[in-house]
Image (cartoon, rainbow, N blue to C red):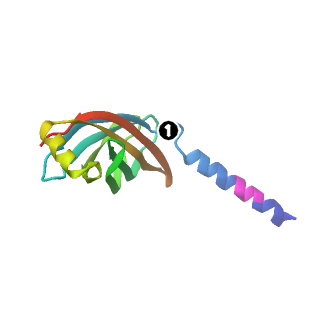
């Protein structure tokens, strides 16, 4: 009888421990700033800073960036980074993003003409970043859209 009592009690303690270690409030994605698109051959390079806020009283570690960059609704680049960046408690922080934009999905001739003319493109950032708090990982969704002029 003590064996059947100990399993649920152990499960309860482990669950309580996991819940208490998780952040009380979600990390907040605030947007993207300092977006720069530079021509480097036929594939422009996009650099930007993703802005977040940690409203919690505990430090965290940024573990992973997993963001897709879409240009006019078509996948153009993937940002995949494994990190060990410390995030201070109750603070804003930013993450540098760099992606080589592949515009061949948009059509080579049209893309070249549009880049010379400086056409505005709709750029979307979709994905997540993963943070860890006391060994417990949490996904923070990233969803942002803007129009940006890309010119060679």
On the question of residue 136 being in view, the answer is yes
Q: Position of residue 49 (x, y in %)?
A: 27, 40
Q: Which residue is mark 1?
A: 26
Specify the quadrant that holds the N terminus.
bottom right
**Foreground pick, 124 / 15:** 124
The structure residue drawn at horizontal position 21% and vertical position 51%, both measured from the top left corner, is 108
On the question of residue 102 being in view, the answer is no
Left or right of residue 135: residue 142: left
The structure residue drawn at horizontal position 37% and vertical position 51%, both measured from the top left corner, is 65
Q: Main secondary structure of the magenta part?
A: helix
Tell me how many marks there are. 1
Report crowding for label 1: few under 14, some 14 to 19, many 20 or more residues within 10 A (C-alpha): some
The structure residue drawn at horizontal position 60% and vertical position 51%, both measured from the top left corner, is 18
Q: Position of residue 112 (x, y in %)?
A: 16, 47
> Looking at the picture, does residue 63 appear above or below residue 72?
below
SS label for mark 1: loop
| Quarter of image, res 87 | top left
Q: Residue furthest front?
A: 109
Specify the quadrant that holds the C terminus.
top left
Q: Is residue 150 one of those drawn in magenta? A: no
Left or right of residue 32: residue 109: left
Q: Residue furthest right?
A: 1
Q: Position of residue 28 (x, y in %)?
A: 43, 36
**Foreground pick, 35 / 104:** 104
The structure residue drawn at horizontal position 61% and vertical position 47%, both measured from the top left corner, is 19
Q: Position of residue 64 (x, y in %)?
A: 39, 54
Magenta extent: 8-12
């Amino acid at each position: 009888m003590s064996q059947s009592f100990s399993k649920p009690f152990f499960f309860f303690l482990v669950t309580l421990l996991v819940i208490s270690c998780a952040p009380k409030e979600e990390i907040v994605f605030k947007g993207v700033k300092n977006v720069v698109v530079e021509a480097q051959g036929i594939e422009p390079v996009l650099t930007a800073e993703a802005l977040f806020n940690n409203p919690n009283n505990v430090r965290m570690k940024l573990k992973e960036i997993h963001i897709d960059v879409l240009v006019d609704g078509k996948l153009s680049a993937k940002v995949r980074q494994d990190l060990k960046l410390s995030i201070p408690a109750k603070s804003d922080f930013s993450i540098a993003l760099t992606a080589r934009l592949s515009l061949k999905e948009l059509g080579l001739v049209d893309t070249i003409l549009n880049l010379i003319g400086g056409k505005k493109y709709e750029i979307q950032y979709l994905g997540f970043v993963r943070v860890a708090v006391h060994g417990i990982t949490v996904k923070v969704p990233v969803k942002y859209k803007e129009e940006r002029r890309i010119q060679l």
